């Protein structure tokens, strides 16, 4: 099971970064390249503990659905989401936030397992881990850009 760890320094208060990271609306903006839309569960605003959201997005030219639940929540330091149903065999995403002198260190720990046994393992090694890393980095760049501007007020 691959684990992706990404750290992003954001020059903004920890509470702002935490809330932007759980904004359904900002998530949709940050994933425009995959046309990701919330279609069930929490459809807008800030997702909370035990809430779910189902996303519809285009990856590798195919529209897919992914349903996740927020399974842990400690504002403004940490929240976790886990896949309930989707294309992966399993998926967990831990979001950590650390206040630092120069802003907030946002840490993503994303663990997933592709389906289809050995074929899934090969896909993880050949392209899926790199694809998911790039996807998360683009999302984090949008969060950073919004958090460091006045645009954040539109989302929290």
Image: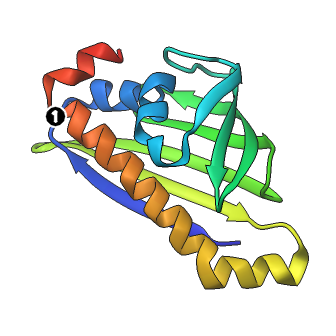
Crowdedness of circle 1 by 10 Å Cα count: few (<14), some, many (20+)? some
Viewer can see residue 98: no
Instruction: Find residue 14 and report its horizontal and vertical position in percent.
Output: 27, 31
Q: Nearer the viewer, residue 117 or 77?
A: 117
Residue projecting furthest to the right? 116
Tell how many labels: 1
Tell me which residue sits at (58%, 72%) in the image: 129
Image-based side of 32 in relation to 81, left or right? left
Above or below, 129 relative to 121: above
Q: Secondary structure at mark 1?
A: loop
Residue to which mark 1 is pinned:
148
Tell me which residue sits at (31%, 32%) in the image: 17
Image-based side of 36 in relation to 89, left or right? left
The image's colour scheme reads rainbow
Quarter in which the C terminus is drawn? top left
Q: Nearer the viewer, residue 131 or 95?
A: 131
Viewer can see residue 109: yes
Instruction: Find residue 76 and report its horizontal and vertical position in percent.
Output: 39, 28
């Amino acid at each position: 099971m691959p684990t992706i760890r990404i750290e992003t320094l954001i020059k903004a208060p920890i509470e702002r970064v935490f809330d932007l990271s759980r904004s359904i609306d900002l998530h949709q903006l940050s994933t425009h390249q995959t046309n990701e839309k919330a279609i069930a569960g929490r459809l807008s605003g800030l997702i909370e503990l035990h809430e779910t959201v189902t996303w519809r997005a285009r990856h590798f030219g195919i529209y897919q659905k992914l349903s996740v639940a927020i399974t842990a929540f400690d504002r403004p330091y940490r929240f976790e989401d886990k896949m309930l149903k989707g294309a992966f065999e399993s998926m967990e995403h831990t979001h950590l936030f650390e206040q630092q002198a120069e802003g907030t260190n946002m840490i993503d720990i994303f663990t997933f397992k592709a389906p289809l046994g050995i074929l899934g393992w090969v896909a993880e090694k050949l392209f899926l881990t790199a694809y998911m890393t790039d996807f998360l980095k683009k999302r984090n760049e949008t969060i950073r850009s919004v958090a460091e501007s006045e645009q954040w007020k539109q989302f929290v």
